[in-house]
Amino acid sequence: MSFISYAQNGEDVLLWRALGHVAAGFYIDVGANDPEEHSVTKAFYDAGWRGINIEPMPSYHQVFLTERPRDINLAVACGAQEGRITLFDTPAVNGWASTDAAVARAHRDEGIAVVETEVPLRTLSAICAEYAPAEIHFLKIDVEGFEAEVLRGMDLGRWQPWLLVIEATMPNSRVTNHEQWEMLVTAHGYQFAYFDGLNRYYVAPGHPELAAALAVQANVFDDYIGHHLDKAWRHADQLAEQAAEQAAASADQLAQAQAQLADAHARLAQSAEQLHDAVEAWHASEQQNLTVQQHADAAEISRRDTAAWAQSLELQLQQTLASRSWRWSRPLRTLGRHSGLRAGLPWLRGALRKGLMWLSQRQSVRRAVLLVLARFPALHARAMRLHARVRGAAPLLVTPGVPLEQQLLTLSARRVLADLQRSRPPL
């Protein structure tokens, strides 16, 4: 995994190259400014180290308390003696606050607003005596031109951090100022090891082996990236992960939508089939209704015709029953019902002879008798022959296709008789 650098000039990369083998080391950061931005100690804190953060700006103190709970966070300035001091802050430019009045004048000359704040002043030796362990692995000082005063308040003979990292240029300038304080360092046996363009690195007399790690600037072989790039990559990874999750969710939604669409198509096809069946059934029903109606119409016509025929037949029957011939022939109809008389009794012959004579003289009675005789063809034939002999005349002429019993009837009477014969049940 790559080393994540938070320092502004790769200072933490060089220090990690020299001290990365130390587990749970200790540091002191004078002029810590921010717990993350341009921080030389943030990477070490994340690696399990702890230390003392000294930042006189009150606005940063709470941030350190929140972000660095394992560290000792002091809202004081460091100098050559104990007391109080005026801090010249530049709210518009982070990291340019200084206790040097000359630096504040230079900022004002450049048009940068400066705010004066009085803060506690302590010596670094007193702070170390109160908070530091026996081994201090590195001391970093960045106080915007006040480095000499900080070093005057530090007893490097008693407290000897393994490495010193001290800002060596004037604020916001390439002009070096290490000649003002370097003798305070080298006088205690520290050896200059490296200048990175902003800071000078010194190795304690007890750890000369660390000098080799500070021979060159931070480079590709240190396998490091800036924390801004790391955040950008992590943010990109998060976005990619979110995009993948959204894509997966979209794919699921698409699959569900496709399934719902397929189901809708199936339901539509089923509905279309049901509609087709319903239309077919409706057509069949309409056709059936039409056929039923036609049958009903035909039946109604037949009923009306039958009713009219029955009415006409009833009228004819009533006329026949009301006629005198029907009333006069009643005795003969009664005799005709007895089948024993059909054998021809002798006395019936004499009666017939006399009757025929009588009939020959009465036209209306003769017609009624003929109607009765028509029911007995053999008797009827004999009566006709007998009638001819009695009268001494030839037999009556008959009209072709007209039965003998109807010869003496009118055309309308023949029709009524034919209807009666059709409607009469068999004996």
Image (cartoon, rainbow, N blue to C red):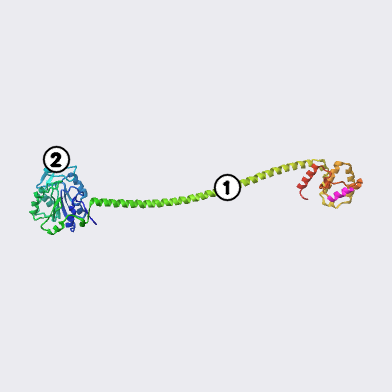
Residue drawn at x 30%, y 50% as measured from the top left:
239
Which x, y percent locates residue 281? Answer: 56, 49
Q: Is residue 22 above or below residue 322?
A: below
**Residue closer to the observer: 112 or 309:** 112
Q: Secondary structure at mark 2?
A: helix
Quadrant where the image shows the N terminus: bottom left
**Residue closer to the observer: 91 or 49:** 91
Residue drawn at x 55%, y 47% as measured from the top left:
279
Q: Determine the main secondary structure of the stretch shown in magenta.
A: helix
Which x, y percent locates residue 82? Answer: 10, 46
Q: Amino acid at mark 2?
A: Asp
Query: In this figure, which residue is indicated by the disc labeled 2?
Result: 109
Q: Amino acid at mark 1?
A: His
Distance from the alpha carbon under mark 2 to that under mark 1: 103 Å
Query: In this figure, which residue is indicated by the disc labeled 1?
Result: 283
Q: Residue furthest front?
A: 174
Residue range (magenta): 377-386
